[in-house]
Image (spheres, helix red, strand yellow):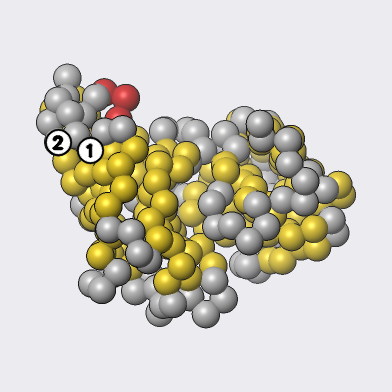
């Protein structure tokens, strides 16, 4: 069966510090991978998606970046965090051509 | 503009009671609609998917309906349990670029 792992679960970082959130998927090949951010009281906002290794599409301009160094690994990064980067980050995967998303457990980021 | 709107924003019911959550969308063309359940601090989990030709689909105590003509969907929860307390998110796949469009969710609290 397929599983998705996302870490760390919680993170408290000072403004200006770097960020790295990692996500891995097991039990499937060539998945679509996604990073979403969920702010309190708002819907999920798509940040990045990837249809293959090294292929990253950005939906919202910001100081975040994403990379896919391996087929089932998706990393969300920042060189310098802003207060506005605080939120709940969700990694997800889907089968190519399917709209059903399978989410990770999420990472709560607090920037102080 | 492709949008998904959910109502009510929040809802409190007593354990054992039924409730119905609404989702209205303006997404066109339409591919499918999914209902997700998101426990606090966790990733969303898919409850059901509705395609254009489906009117009703059940998953245990959850029953989803779809009226593609009026672009409305509902999620009915029967005999609610405390574990039903969560945010319920309506997601539509569609639009010119066939993307996922998220509603902001309905926060349900089931009280004993």
Q: What secondary structure is found at the residue carrying circle 1?
A: strand
Q: Where is residue B46 in the image (x, y as percent from the top left)?
A: 45, 43
Answer whether labels 2 and 1 touch (C-beta < 8 Å).
Answer: yes
Distance in Å between CA atoms under marks 2 and 1: 6 Å
The residue located at (23%, 38%) in the rendering is B77
* B66 horizontally vs A48: left or right: left
* A70 horizontally vs B104: left or right: right
Chain for mark 2? B
Chain for mark 1? B
Quadrant assignment for the C terminus of chain B: top left
Give the farthest residue toward the front. B53
On the same chain, marks 2 and 1? The answer is yes
Q: Mark 2 points at which residue?
A: B18
Question: Dot 2: few (<14), some (14–19), or many (≥20) neighbours within 10 Å?
Answer: some
Residue B73, picture quadrant: bottom left
Q: Nearer the viewer, residue A78 or B50?
A: B50
Q: Position of residue B8 (x, y in %)?
A: 21, 52
Q: Where is residue B25 in the image (x, y as percent from the top left)?
A: 33, 68
The residue located at (50%, 49%) in the rendering is A38
Q: Name the residue under label 1.
A: B77
Residue B62, picture quadrant: top left
Instruction: Kindly tell me whether residue B48 is visible in this rendering.
Output: yes
Question: Dot 1: few (<14), some (14–19), or many (≥20) neighbours within 10 Å?
Answer: many
The residue located at (87%, 49%) in the rendering is A69
Q: What secondary structure is found at the residue carrying circle 2?
A: loop
């Amino acid at each position: 069966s397929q599983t998705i792992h996302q870490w760390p679960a919680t993170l408290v970082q000072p403004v200006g510090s770097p960020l790295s959130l990692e996500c891995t998927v097991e039990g499937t090949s060539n998945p679509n991978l996604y990073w979403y951010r969920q702010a309190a009281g708002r819907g999920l906002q798509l940040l990045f998606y990837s249809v293959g290794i090294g292929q990253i599409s950005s939906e919202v301009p910001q100081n975040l970046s994403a990379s896919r160094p391996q087929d089932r690994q998706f990393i969300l990064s920042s060189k310098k965090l802003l207060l506005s980067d605080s939120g709940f980050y969700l990694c997800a995967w889907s089968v190519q051509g399917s709209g059903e998303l399978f989410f990770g457990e999420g990472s709560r980021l607090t920037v102080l | 503009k492709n949008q998904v709107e959910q109502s009510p924003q929040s809802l409190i019911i007593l354990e054992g009671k039924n409730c119905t959550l609404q989702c209205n969308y303006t997404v066109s063309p339409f591919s499918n609609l999914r209902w997700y359940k998101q426990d606090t601090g966790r990733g969303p989990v898919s409850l059901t998917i509705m395609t254009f030709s489906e009117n009703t689909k059940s998953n245990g105590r959850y029953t989803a309906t779809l009226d593609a003509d009026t672009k409305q969907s509902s999620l009915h929860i029967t005999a609610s349990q405390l574990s039903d307390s969560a945010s319920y998110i309506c997601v539509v796949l569609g639009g010119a670029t066939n993307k996922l469009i998220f509603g902001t969710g309905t926060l349900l609290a089931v009280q004993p």
